[in-house]
Each structure stands twice: as C-alpha cells, then as structure tokens.
Amino acid sequence: MSSTAAIMTVTKMLESLPESVQERVVEHLREYLADLQDELKWDSLFEQTQSQLVTAARRAKQDIVQGCAQPMDDERL
C-alpha cells in the first residue's frame, strides 16, 4: 500500500467517526507525530556524534588503565 493510499484510508476512517471523536483522534495523531519527530531528531543527532562518543569512551578507558581517572564525585555534578 502506498503512503497516499494509506493516508486516504485513514482519512476515510476518520470521516466515518463523529466529529467530536475525529477531534480527539487528530489531537492524538498530532502528539504521536510530534513524538516521532523528536525521536528522528534524537537519532540524527546521535548518529552525527557517535564517532565522538566512541573516541571519548576509548580515551576514558585508556585513562582508567593508566591510572589517570578519578572516581566521579556526584556532589560536583
């Protein structure tokens, strides 16, 4: 099923509902789509910084092996 056909199907389903229910469904869809957009943005940001995270993790591991690391002080966070 193409995305256009899927949208048309959902539209027809919505049109078959009472108007008050349509409004509730649309509000839920807005919230759901906003959450999806946030997830896509997070995934994109994570993908862009993944190599930097790997480099930082390797450096931290090396510091631990060399005895240069200090335990984290929760009071200083």
Image (cartoon, helix red, strand yellow):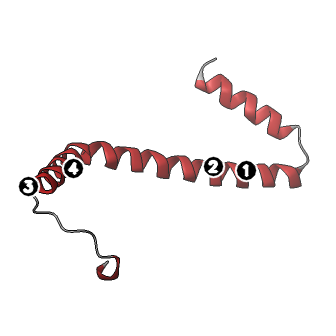
Residue at the farthest right position: 18
Q: Amino acid at mark 3?
A: Gln
Q: Earlier in the sequence, mark 2 or mark 1?
A: 1
Label 1 sits on a secondary structure element that is helix
Residue marked by disc 3: 66
Height in image: 3 above or below 13?
A: above
- Could you say where residue 15 lies in the image, as x and y percent from the top left? 83, 39
Q: CA distance from mark 4 to mark 3?
A: 14 Å
Residue corresponding to mark 1: 26
Q: Are marks 4 and 3 in contact (CB under 8 Å)?
A: no
- Count all numbered tags in the image, as a single digit: 4
The numbered disc on residue 32 is 2
Say which element carries label 4: helix
Q: Amino acid at mark 4?
A: Ala
The location of residue 72, given as percent across then percent down, is: 28, 70
Seen at 29% across and 81% down, the residue is 76
Instruction: Give the CA separation, mark 1 to mark 4.
Output: 43 Å
Eye-nearest disc, 2 or 3: 3
Q: What whole-number distance in Å separates the C-alpha atoms at marks 2 and 3?
A: 48 Å
Front disc: 2 or 4: 4
x and y, in percent, of residue 75 in the image: 33, 82
Determine the residue positioned at 10% across, 63% down: 68
Quarter in which the N terminus is drawn: top right
Gap in angstroms between the C-alphas marked 2 and 1: 10 Å
Name the residue tied to disc 4.
57
Left or right of 58, for residue 16: right
Q: Amino acid at mark 2?
A: Tyr
Question: Which mark sits nearer the N-terminus, 2 or 4?
Answer: 2
Left or right of 1 on screen, residue 41: left
**Sequence-first disc among 1 and 4:** 1
